[in-house]
Amino acid sequence: MNILENIKDDNWKNIVENMKGDIFINQKNKKEAIKSWKNSLLIENSNASKEIIQMKINEQIQEN
């Protein structure tokens, strides 16, 4: 997580947010994971990547 926090290049922001979501979900922090994935969705350009991120979010929402 510390490495990701040090990436300041905005071109990597969507990837950083997506990876942070993955880290948070592995730490059992569903709320922060969904928040990070949603941030990634807002800035992601690739439709395929957007679909994958949305599937991650939907999976966590359905588990409630």
Image (spheres, rainbow, N blue to C red):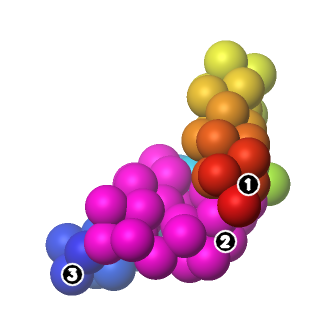
Which residue lies most toward the left here? 3
Camera sees residue 40:
no
Q: CA distance from mark 1 to mark 2?
A: 12 Å
Let me know if residue 21 is in the magenta part: yes
Quarter in which the N terminus is drawn: bottom left
Which of labels 1 and 2 is toward the front? 1
Which of labels 2 and 3 is toward the front? 2
Local SS, label 3: helix
Residue drawn at 62 percent across, 76 percent down:
31
Q: Is residue 6 above or below residue 55?
A: below
Q: What amino acid type is highlighted by mark number 3?
A: Asn
- The label shown at residue 61 is 1
Q: CA distance from mark 3 to mark 1?
A: 27 Å
Q: What amino acid type is highlighted by mark number 1?
A: Ile
Residue annotated with mark 2: 35
Q: Earlier in the sequence, mark 1 or mark 2?
A: 2
Residue drawn at 46 percent across, 76 percent down:
29
Let me know if residue 53 is in the magenta part: no
Residue range of the region highlighted in magenta in the rendering: 15-39
Residue drawn at 21 percent across, 81 percent down:
2
Residue 47 in picture, x, y percent from top left: 75, 22
Q: Earlier in the sequence, mark 2 or mark 3?
A: 3
Quick check: 1 left or right of 38? left
Q: Is residue 53 above or below residue 19?
A: above
Are the residues tagged 1 and 2 within 8 Å (C-beta)? Answer: no
Q: Which quadrant of the view contains residue 5?
A: bottom left
Q: CA distance from mark 2 to mark 3?
A: 18 Å
Quick check: 2 left or right of 63? left
Residue 9 in picture, x, y percent from top left: 44, 64
Local SS, label 1: helix
Residue annotated with mark 3: 2
Q: What amino acid type is highlighted by mark number 2?
A: Lys
